[in-house]
Image: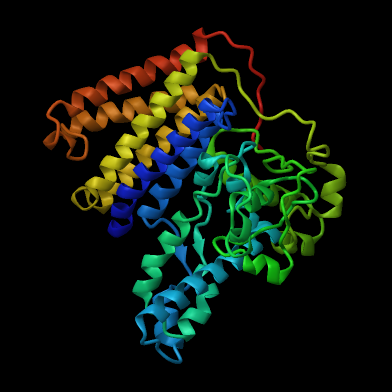
């Protein structure tokens, strides 16, 4: 976990720089693909994901080292061959994991957040899950385990393979000629994120595009079919926690409501979107039928509100980077407390983005918890050793959080429709 946190110290600034470049380019060519609240929601989703993963929250059914030590039939000795086989094995496993996520109800829950943005940009790439609490990916790496690929090689390549999928989440790069025949490109991935009937569940590859061509899931981006983004049952919230579990909640409610005992079980493993007949008839869902004519989710936001939300996200990002920088010094119990505070921060300001009244109570609780912690410890997880006035600065930040929550809830007058997430 500490190695992962160290890797993120370098990766996160790189991602942020690319995001700034994309936003700047969009402004320069007068073709902006970012909307502030949507991008803040996307980035915040990424923050929740890296907090969860760095803290090791989840249950691993089978670990790759266990499978390799138990099942290896041989061992590859050539260094170049080890890395090549490992890369192909990871990408092959990634294709099938991705395909399962699109085709089985319970697995879709952990992937839907990645598709939930109704925009398509580099921030969208950061919409990664916290709902993947049961780890089974190692089972898809059986070919690598049988060939004896060392666990260390998989551990090094896996995050690189994930980070390498960031760049093609953009609308500013067109088709790339011969490159399209081997690798996943922005054009191919625009198809993947689209909700047009022609594009649904296509282009599931992660780095190599050959798997889609071999297994019948490839679709070219068509000039006459401009991609429209999001999911057919819109998330209707900026809150990444709600997006992460709303599909699971719907499945649970449907399983409870149906009178058919077999349907209560099989709903979890049926194709994505399948519902028991009796529940579907009595409790219909509204889905997008015309992908070119529907109202995207939005909440009213003044420039002051947008600036405040951006400030909250940047402060949360800065606190996260401090956590990664002092990962071992904070200690695991301290990290759990720290991670819980960051989760609460993201839940609070993203609920405020949704203009939910309960956001006020979350923010009051967060500010109070921050004051109490600094009062009892006299510090903020060792930050005073780097900056003597850190505690005072953070107390001032909590005062701003408290005051802004009250102001934006009671005094900033906006006409806002209440959009329920579930």
Q: Is residue 59 above or below residue 72?
A: above
Q: Where is residue 401 in the image (x, y as percent from the top left)?
A: 37, 21
Judge from the rendering whether residue 88 lies leftward or rightward of residue 51; answer left or right. right
- Quadrant including the N terminus: bottom left
Q: Position of residue 100 (x, y in %)?
A: 65, 64
Number of numbered discs overlaid on the protein picture: 0
Q: Position of residue 327 (x, y in %)?
A: 24, 50
Judge from the rendering whether residue 223 lies leftward or rightward of residue 240; answer left or right. right
Q: Residue at x 46, y 28 (%)?
A: 349
Q: Is residue 120 above or below residue 402?
A: below
Q: Which residue is drawn at 53% across and 52% down?
A: 131
- Quadrant including the C terminus: top right
Q: Seen from this angle, which residue lies furthest bottom?
A: 73
Q: Which residue is drawn at 69% across and 30% down?
A: 296
Q: Which residue is drawn at 49% across and 25% down?
A: 359
Quadrant for residue 82, please give it. bottom left
Q: Position of residue 79 (x, y in %)?
A: 35, 80
Quadrant for residue 7, please give it. bottom left
Judge from the rendering whether residue 9 lies leftward or rightward of residue 356; answer left or right. left
- As rendered, which of 402 and 178 lies closer to the eye? 178
- As rendered, which of 257 and 338 lies closer to the eye? 338
Q: In this view, does 386 lie above or below 308?
A: below
Colour scheme of the picture:
rainbow
- As rendered, which of 257 and 112 lies closer to the eye? 112
Judge from the rendering whether residue 36 lies leftward or rightward of residue 420; answer left or right. left
């Amino acid at each position: 976990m500490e190695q992962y946190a160290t890797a993120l110290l370098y990766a996160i600034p790189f991602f942020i720089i690319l995001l700034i470049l994309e936003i700047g380019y969009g402004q320069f060519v007068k073709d902006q693909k970012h909307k502030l609240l949507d991008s803040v929601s996307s980035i915040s989703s990424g923050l929740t994901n890296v907090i969860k993963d760095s803290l090791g929250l989840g249950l691993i059914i089978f670990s790759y080292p266990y499978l390799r030590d138990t099942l290896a039939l041989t061992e590859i000795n050539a260094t170049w061959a080890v890395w090549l086989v490992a890369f192909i094995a990871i990408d092959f496993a990634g294709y099938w994991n991705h395909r399962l996520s699109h085709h089985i109800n319970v697995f879709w829950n952990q992937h839907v957040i990645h598709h939930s943005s109704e925009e398509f940009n580099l921030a969208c790439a950061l919409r990664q899950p916290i709902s993947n609490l049961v780890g089974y990916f190692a089972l898809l790496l059986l070919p690598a385990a049988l060939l004896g690929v060392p666990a260390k090689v998989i551990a090094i390549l896996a995050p690189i393979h994930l980070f390498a999928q960031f760049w093609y989440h953009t609308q500013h790069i067109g088709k790339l000629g011969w490159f399209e025949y081997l690798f996943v490109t922005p054009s191919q991935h625009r198809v993947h994120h689209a909700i047009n009937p022609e594009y649904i569940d296509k282009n599931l590859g992660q780095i190599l595009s050959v798997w889609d061509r071999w297994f019948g899931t490839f679709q070219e981006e068509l000039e006459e079919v401009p991609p429209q983004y999001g999911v057919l049952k819109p998330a209707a919230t900026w809150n990444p926690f709600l997006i992460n579990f709303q599909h699971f909640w719907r499945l649970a409610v449907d399983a409870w409501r149906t009178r058919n005992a077999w349907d209560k079980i099989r709903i979890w493993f049926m194709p994505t979107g399948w519902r028991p007949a009796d529940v579907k008839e009595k409790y219909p869902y509204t889905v997008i039928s015309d992908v070119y004519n529907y109202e995207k989710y939005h909440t009213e936001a003044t420039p002051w509100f947008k600036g405040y939300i951006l400030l909250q996200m940047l402060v949360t990002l800065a606190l996260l980077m401090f956590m990664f920088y002092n990962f071992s010094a904070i200690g695991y119990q301290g990290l759990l407390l720290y991670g819980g505070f960051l989760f609460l921060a993201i839940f609070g300001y993203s609920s405020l983005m949704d203009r939910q009244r309960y956001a006020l109570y979350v923010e009051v609780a967060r500010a109070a918890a921050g004051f109490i912690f600094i009062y009892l410890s006299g510090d903020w997880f060792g930050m005073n050793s780097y900056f003597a006035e850190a505690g005072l600065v953070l107390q001032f930040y909590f005062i701003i959080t408290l005051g802004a929550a009250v102001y934006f809830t009671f005094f900033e007058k906006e006409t806002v429709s209440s959009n329920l997430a579930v």
